[in-house]
Amino acid sequence: NLTLLVIFFVKLFTLLDFFYFMQAFLRSVFRQIVCKRLPLKVLVRGKNRMSEPNLNPEKAPTIRDVAKLAQVSVATVSRVLNGTAKVSQKARDAVLNAQRELGFYLNANARALAQKDSEIIGVLVSEVSDPYFGVMVRSCEEVAHENGKALLVAQGFHDPVREQRAIENLLSHQCSGLVIHALAIPDRVLARYMQDFSYMVIINRILPGFEDRCVNINNFQGMYLAVSTLIKNGHRKIA
């Protein structure tokens, strides 16, 4: 019984080490994707204070309301919130204070359509309940947060129709980058997306012709290294 217990804990710690390794690996890969492949924009950040939500949707504040309260022009409000031009510190503070007081938020969808870009990175996984994808999404979110981005996560459930629908949905949100795990979609369909959208990256799959945008893990080599480590540490009964 003691031997079985020891073997159980060895396997448990090996599995935990694998998950920690995968988290670090995926964080590193995603950081390269975000920092080197995707265009980043400078975001305007106010003080570390949360805005009060607007509790009356029938009278949602507008950019004109913010400008009126801050006693500046609508153009100045737009410049501050979008970070498109320099404004005085006094005007910036007035706009951010008015924004917080009114609970005003820019329409991200409208801005994405106008700029053909957004601050969102789309991620497609099979199932978020899977521990592997849970680690992956968490790592992606951490790197996205570091770069002023947010994640939009979709699930494909190993179904070609749902995977394709998820990709189309992410594209409709004008995501500035896509990290796609899709094993059920045929190569010819996935290749069309890769051809049309240069900011799409594939994981756990090598697509011919797009190898430089594919990230694949050598599971055989990983298992070989794990078992070799156990053998070097004196373990012989490995299930």
Image: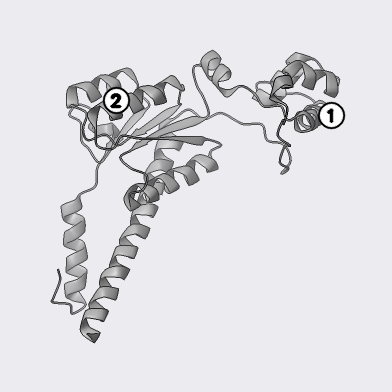
Q: Is residue 44 left or right of residue 28?
A: right
Q: At x 20% / y 62%, what residue is drawn?
A: 225
Residue 103 drawn at (x, y percent): 73, 30
* Quadrant position of the C terminus in the picture: bottom left
**Near-viewer residue (48 or 101):** 101
Tag of residue 167: none
Tell me if mark 1 has few (under 14), some (14-19) or many (20+) residues whose alpha carbon lies within 10 angstroms of its own: few
Query: Disc 1 vs disc 2: which is toward the camera?
Result: 2
Residue 88 vs 48, above or below: the answer is: above
Mark 1 secondary-structure assignment: helix
Label 1 or label 2, whichever comes before in sequence order: 1
Q: Which label sits on residue 90?
A: 1
- Label 2 is placed on what type of residue? Gln
- Give coordinates of residue 34: x percent, y percent: 44, 36
Give the numbered dot on residue 164.
2
* Residue lying at 20% horizontally and 49% vertically, measured from the top left: 218
Quote the CA–CA distance across marks 1 and 2: 48 Å
**Quarter-of-image position of residue 11:** bottom left
Measured as percent of width and height from the top left, residue 28 is found at 40, 47
x, y percentage for residue 102? Answer: 77, 28
Circle 2 — which element? helix
Q: In the depicted view, which residue is nearer to us: 83 or 105?
A: 105
Left or right: 90 as drawn, with respect to 24 = right
Choose between 53 and 153: the one closer to the eye. Answer: 53
- State which quadrant residue 20 falls in: bottom left
Q: Residue at x 30, y 40 (%)?
A: 126
- For the image shown, how many numbered marks are present on the structure? 2
Q: Nearer the viewer, residue 173 or 206?
A: 173
Task: Determine the residue positioned at 26% across, 80% down.
Answer: 6
Q: Residues within 10 Å of mark 2 (few under 14, many from 20)?
A: some
**Is 105 placed above or below 20 here?**
above
